[in-house]
Amino acid sequence: MASMQTVPAYDLRISIQGTQPEIWRRLLLPETITIPQFHDAIQRAFGWQDRHLYGIRCLDRNGEPRVIVGPDEAAEDVDAELASGVVLFELIDALRTGPADFEYEYDFGDTWTHKVELVESGLCPEGTITCVEGANRGPVEDSGGPHGYRRLAKILADENHPEFYDAATWFEGVTGERARAFDVGAFDLDVVNRRLGRLSLQLWPRPLTPAERDAVLRPIMWFLENSAGEGQELTKDGYLKPAMVRRTLDELGWHDAIMGKGNRELNAKDVLNLRLHLLDWKLLRKRNGRMVLGPMGKVGLAEPDKLWGHMVETIGAPQNDALKLMTRLAAHWLVQGFAPSYTLRDKVILSALEAAGFTTRSGDPIPESWAWDIDRTVRESLDCLQLTVPAPRFRLTEKDLTDGGLKFLLQVQALLEDR
């Protein structure tokens, strides 16, 4: 196997001013990345959720003052330089290490100012961004800047504080994390580098491997393989036999502490959801009390690449515009590695539907129950694939996409953009 190529890189120490204890990360990244890519790297490294504008103030490598704002439409409003037209190499002189006149600011309301210092210049593997070290968890989004975050951390550290309940409720609603588990000093280098790894695959795509393809399609392929030939016998009510339900749960690791090891489809919702979707997608069909392969199922079983393409097309071409919008949102949240907490999710979806002009047939606003149904429909489709690293089904923290899962969703996003 050929060794990975290396490219000129910056080793940068980035710290958030005014934080106590100091929140900082040390990033190794190619010197040729654009400022929007640099912004994305900071967002992933500190756990920001890219909800706000950002800007850079610096003296560039020629000593000229620069004010750069992103996204581009925001720069046009404030008469600043467009971020997309700037490469990091223009701003940092590799020969001048140490403190530099370079600041990245995120959220112009809360004013999170990140000081950027060059530790050294060197090389990094091509197509990678890596966090070398760091300290302390990133601030909570919309917590009011360094002062507001310090106050929030102080309240959450004391369950007897008179404002603890309100602060904990807000924190859990915004982050989806448990307030009593909040730790200002938490920092997991592996988690940060998994986020940066996802970003690297977005910025520098790599071909899909057969192993990645097979892992994503595994639940579907399991059903197709077990429905080949004479197919699967169904109960008189049209359900899978208990033995097949149990085998599927064991094979796919879908047992959980809440549902236990039930062997009836009605008690194994993931199995029922998958089977019904495969019927709906014509990969399977019922015949004489058995579940057998449909025409596309036969093709997919023989040629997994065609099944991959069929599933990208199926997920990326929903039946109506509301489902298309929800698929965009769901894919974006998974690719970015964050999503609104469950208490905010329906509100975010409703706002997106209203902004897109959706109403009921009578012209009234979309009810919250509809937003929940649309979200559930898309989530159930995505649950038929193995897109994420196996994890407890009901954990609150973000789920990690596999490389294959990321590549699948990037193809879905590309298809949605074309339509």
Image (cartoon, rainbow, N blue to C red):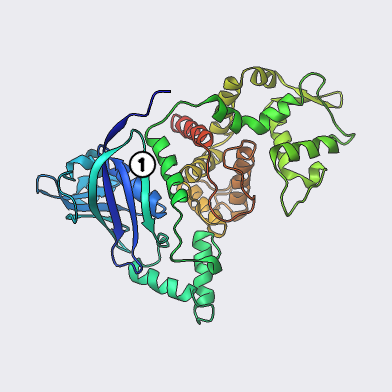
Q: What residue is shown with label 1?
A: 129
Residue lying at the far right of the rendered structure: 236
Residue at horizontal 31 percent and vertical 32 percent from the top: 6
- Horizontal relation, residue 362 to residue 189: left or right: right
Secondary structure category for the residue under label 1: loop
Residue 230 rendering spot, x and y as whole percentages: 82, 20
Q: Residue at x 25, y 52 (%)?
A: 55
How many numbered discs, if any? 1
* Vertical relation: 4 (above or below) 79: above
Q: Examine the rendered structure and indicate whether residue 247 appears above or below residue 81.
A: above
Quarter of the picture holding the N terminus: top left
- Residue at x-position 28% and y-position 45%: 73
Quarter of the rendering containing residue 129: top left
Q: Residue at x 84, y 26 (%)?
A: 290
Image-based side of 198 in relation to 323, left or right: left
Q: Measured from the top left, where is residue 162 in percent x and y?
A: 51, 82
Q: In this rendering, would 266 be left or right of 410?
A: right
The answer to whether one can see residue 240 in this image is no
Query: Which one is nearer the viewer's eye here, 99 or 341?
Result: 99
Residue 191 in view: yes
Q: Amino acid at mark 1?
A: Ile
The picture places residue 59, in percent across and down from the top left corner, at: 14, 51
Seen as rendered, the residue at the extreme left is 63
Q: Label 1: how many residues lie within 10 Å, few (<14), some (14-19) or many (20+)?
A: many
